[in-house]
Image (spheres, helix red, strand yellow):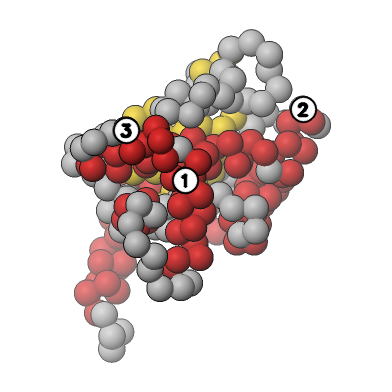
Amino acid sequence: MRYLPKLFENNRRWVAEKTSVDPDFFARQQNSQEPPFLWIGCADSRVPANEIVGLEPGQLFVHRNVANIVAEDDGNLQAALQYAVDNLKVRHVIVCGHYGCGGVQAAMGDPVEPPLEDWIDHIRRIYRDRQAQLDAIEDMDARWRKLCEVNVAEQVANVCASRIVSDAWRRGQQVVIHGWIYDLGSGLLEDLDLTTDGLRAEPGSTDDGVATSSTRDSP
C-alpha cells in the first residue's frame, strides 16, 4: 500500500461494512454471477452505473466507453455483449447516455487528436446525418442535449442490429433493449422510450414488469 493508501483504506472499510451486514457476501460473489442486466454506458466518472440504479455487485454487468458507443468493429464491446447475452443470459441490455457528455460535445466541434478522433467520428457521422435537424436548434446547450439523446437512439439501434442480439431473438431468447439518459445535474434517469424486445409484434411486458414495445423513431 505504498501508493494510493487512501483507496486501500476505503476498500477495507467497504469490505468490513459488507461483511458486517452479510458475512457470506463475498463467498457468494466468487462462485458465480447471474446478473439480469447489461449496462452499456459512458466512461464518464460522474456516471457510476451500479450506484445510480441502486444495484449491488453481481447484479449489473457493465461495459463503459467514451460516449457509450456501440460499434460493430469494437471487439471489446462486442465481446462483452456476446458474453452477457450468450453466457450470462442477461434479460435486459441498457444503453445509457448522459447529458453533458464530453464525447458528444467533441463531435460537434473541431477535430481532436487521434486515437480519440477516430472514436469520436462514430458520433460525427450521426451529427452529419441529422445536421439539419440539430442545427435548427439555436441554443447550443439544447442542441448538445438533443445530440446526446440521438446518440443513445443510434446505439440502441446498433445493439438491435448486432448479430449477437439478432441471433438471440431468432432462437427465442428474451433480451429486451432499453435506451436511457442520465442527468448529471439532478442525478435522475430518463427512459427515452426506445425499448424493444425485437420479436414480439405487440407491446407487452416481461415477467419482471418491464414494459416492452417496438423501437420508436429516434428522438
Amino acid of disc 2: Gly
Estimate the x, y position of residue 173 in percent, counting from the top left. 73, 31
Residue 179 relative to residue 177: left or right:
left
Please tell me the numbered disc located at residue 12: none
Front residue of 127 and 180? 127
Quarter containing the C terminus:
top left
Amino acid of disc 3: Ala
| Residue 98 placement: quadrant | top left
Q: Residue furthest bottom?
A: 2
Quarter containing the N terminus:
bottom left
**Residue ID at (51%, 65%):** 118
Which residue is under mark 1? 128
Q: Judging from the image, what secondary structure is the residue with disc 3 in?
A: loop
Which class describes the residues within 10 Å of circle 1: few (<14), some (14-19), or many (20+)? few
Which residue is under mark 3? 136
Residue 189 seen in the figure: no
Q: CA distance from mark 3 to mark 2?
A: 42 Å
**Residue ID at (71%, 22%):** 199
| Residue 76 placement: quadrant | bottom right
Comparing labels 3 and 2, the label whose residue is closer to the camera: 3
Circle 3/circle 2 CB separation < 8 Å: no
Please tell me the numbered disc located at residue 172: 2
Estimate the x, y position of residue 53 in percent, counting from the top left. 36, 38
Residue 214 relative to residue 148: left or right:
right
Which class describes the residues within 10 Å of circle 2: few (<14), some (14-19), or many (20+)? few
Amino acid of disc 1: Arg
